[in-house]
Each structure stands twice: as structure tokens, then as C-alpha cells.
Image (tube, rainbow, N blue to C red):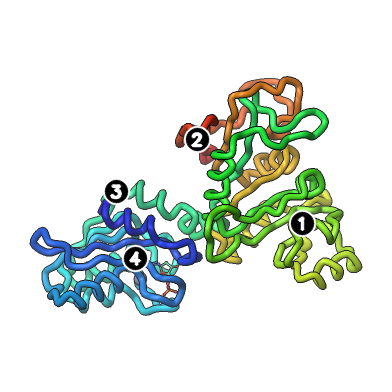
Amino acid sequence: MLQALDLAGKAPQWVAPNPKVGCVIIKNGEILGLGVTQPPGGNHAEIEAMADARIKGHDLEGATAFVTLEPCSHYGRTPPCSDALIKSGIKTVVVACLDTNPLVQGQGIAKLKAAGVEVITGVLEQEARESNLGFLTRMEKGRPWIRMKAAASLDGKTALHNGKSQWITSEAARHDGHLWRSRAGAILTGIGTVQDDNPQLNVRGISVDRQPLRIIVDSKLQISPSAKILTGGGSLIVCAVEDAEKISVLRDAGNEVLCLPNPRGKVDLPALMQELGRRQINELHIEAGSKLNGSLIREQCVDELLLYFAPKLLGDARGLFDLPLLESLDGAQNLSFHEITQIGEDLRILARFNPS
Ligand code: AOF
Ligand code: ZN
């Protein structure tokens, strides 16, 4: 199963919106075939592994398949893997984690069992869930896995009082940040960051087949059509005002404008996350300023913080998140550390919000 997970991890980004799955087929201690999910419309991991074994002249009768995700039971872009596994004569299927796609959700395993295939579940389950956190979150919550990235000094400051912020962390940490951008289906920022930093918010320094969708939360539609983030079109601007004139200028330049107001006249952030789920975004990467960061946290629109800390002190300067003043520690946002790594001179911390 470790080998199957390793294969899954090597699947390219463009298998999204599908999950990355790995499959290893063995018999009598020998590996017969290996497979990994192909881009949408292509073979699933199990089909690839069976084809690999057959090309090598192996008979699958009595073999065991290790799969990192429950084999599918439905007709999607491709026919059900569970049917193909049954037909192959494979005797045992070892599954790491369930596919929580409502179209599958245990039915793949049930199909296999009903056909007399032995099924073993829960092998390296946690690791397998981690490998498809984005896909599984979308299946379970209807929205992407949401990761908020920020870089700060050791005293938690992101910019000086005058707004100067380039660069707090080292080159190595910034390159690492691009790796995280590249794995996301979309990158989100706010109008404040667009106006202060004029970022491109694309992936640089890493070869990618596609750039993530760029999303700007801009309640009052203040974005300038010449902002760098709009060059080339294809960005999604989310606002809370129906300003037909501004909207048509932005649309004519090839961008999409979505009006999603909440009763306070701001963008309805949870509704936006559901919309991104409908657009099949598995992982959302956020790089915004303290105001939007704070709103996203308050509205429970963040699963994980990706924080880079530089060994510097900036003193009285801007903080990471605008959150309400607390009178008691009972109101603190609780997280747990998921991973702590040194990247060059800086520290990278992945911390997750505790599910409520
Ligand atoms: C598997 N093995 O390798 C993957 C699975 O449209 P389709 O036919 O490609 O089906 C996509 C769905 O199949 C996807 O939403 C998920 O539930 C499952 N993915 N299943 O047996 C695989 N990638
Ligand atoms: Zn399948």
C-alpha cells in the first residue's frame, strides 16, 4: 500500500478534479502491475494496473490488488472499476480509504464483496485520506480544502506600518510557496492585496501544465482593469454590487464577474466556497491581507494555515489576521500543528483548525 500511495503521489496535477489514486497488483509476492489515475476521461488506477499486468503477460486469477481509494461503482466518464476487478479474477482487494463521492460511498466495496471478492479496508487509511484531502473535502462538504498562506516575521508581522513588505522570508521559502500554489485549483486574494502589491498570483519557477484559476474578492468592484492579476484575462472577480458598467469592462477583458452579496453588503464567503466546490476546485490557496484573512477565519472558511516565519522582528507593524478583540481566552481560535519544517532560513508551519 505504501508503494500504491507513492504512485498516487506522483500523479500529475491535471488528474484533478479526479482524486489521485495508486494501485499495485501482486501474486505470490511478485508485483504484476502498477497503475495511477490518468487525466479526466482516462483510465482509473485499477484499470491501468490490470492493463500493465496483462501487457507483461500475467494472469490476474487469484491476485491481490492494493488500491489507495475504494474502487468506483458507477459510470462516470469511465465504467466502474469494481466490475473490471471482479471480471479479472482478482481474489483480494485491499482498500486504504473509502471514496466519499456520493455516487460511490461504500458501493464499490459492496459490489466486490457481493461477487465473492475478499475486501480488506482501512490499510494506511489516514495517509490515503491525506493524499486526497482536497477531493474528499469537496465530496464531504461541497467545497474545496482551503489553505491560507502567509509569511511573517517571528513576531507575526507581515508588513511595516507603512505597508512595506517585500521580502520578509527568504528565496527558498518563496519558491516553496510557489510549489503550494501549483497544487491548488485556484488562488484567492482580496482587493486590498491587489491594490497594495499588484501581484500576478500565478505559479512561477515551476513547470506547470495549467495555471490555477485566480480569484479576487472585491466587494465594491474597485479593481483597476490594468491590475497585473487581470492580464491575459481568465480571472474570477467576486463582488457584492451589481455595477453593470464596471462589470462589462471586466468581462470584455476576458474575466468573469460573480455577484455574491451577503446581507452586510460584503461577499458571501461561505457561498463562494460552495460555488468553487461546484466548479470542481479540490484545493483552494489563499494569499490575502489581514482583513480578508480575518473574515475568512471568522466565517470558518479556512481548514489549514501555511505559515512561513522569518527569523526577524519587525516590532510595531501589521499583523497576520484581523480578528475581533477577545476578553477571554475561551474565545481563542484553536488549531493543531500538523507539520513543522525548516525551509532555508525560515520556518514553515502547517496548522489546522480543529473541526467544530
Ligand atoms: C477509482 N480509481 O483511480 C479514481 C477514482 O468520471 P470518471 O469515470 O473518471 O470517475 C470519476 C470518479 O471516480 C471520481 O469522482 C471518484 O469518485 C472516482 N475516482 N476511482 O476507482 C481511480 N481516480
Ligand atoms: Zn474507478
SS type, badge 2: strand
Lower position in the chain sequence, tag 3 or tag 2: 3
Residue 162's x, y, as percent? 82, 31
Residue 194 position (above or below residue 73): above
The residue to which callout 2 is attached is: 343
The residue identified by callout 4 is 36
Mark 1 within 8 Å of ligand 1, using the beta carbon: no
Q: On the rendered structure, is 141 left or right of 152? A: left
Q: What crowding class fits label 3: few (fewer than 14 Cα within 10 Å), some (14-19), or many (20 or more)?
A: some
| Image marks 3 and 4: residues in contact by CB distance under 8 Å | no
**Which of the two labelled residues, at mark 1 and mark 3, occupies the earlier sequence position?**
3
Counting residues from the start of the chain, the first of labels 3 and 4 encountered is: 4
Q: CA distance from mark 1 to mark 3?
A: 44 Å
Identify the image quadrant of the N terminus. Answer: bottom left
Q: Ligand 2 lies in which image quarter?
A: bottom left
Query: Marks 4 and 2, Cα distance to the nearest angstrom?
Result: 30 Å
Q: Which numbered disc, 1 or 4, marks the residue that appears first in the sequence?
A: 4
- Residue that label 3 marks: 124
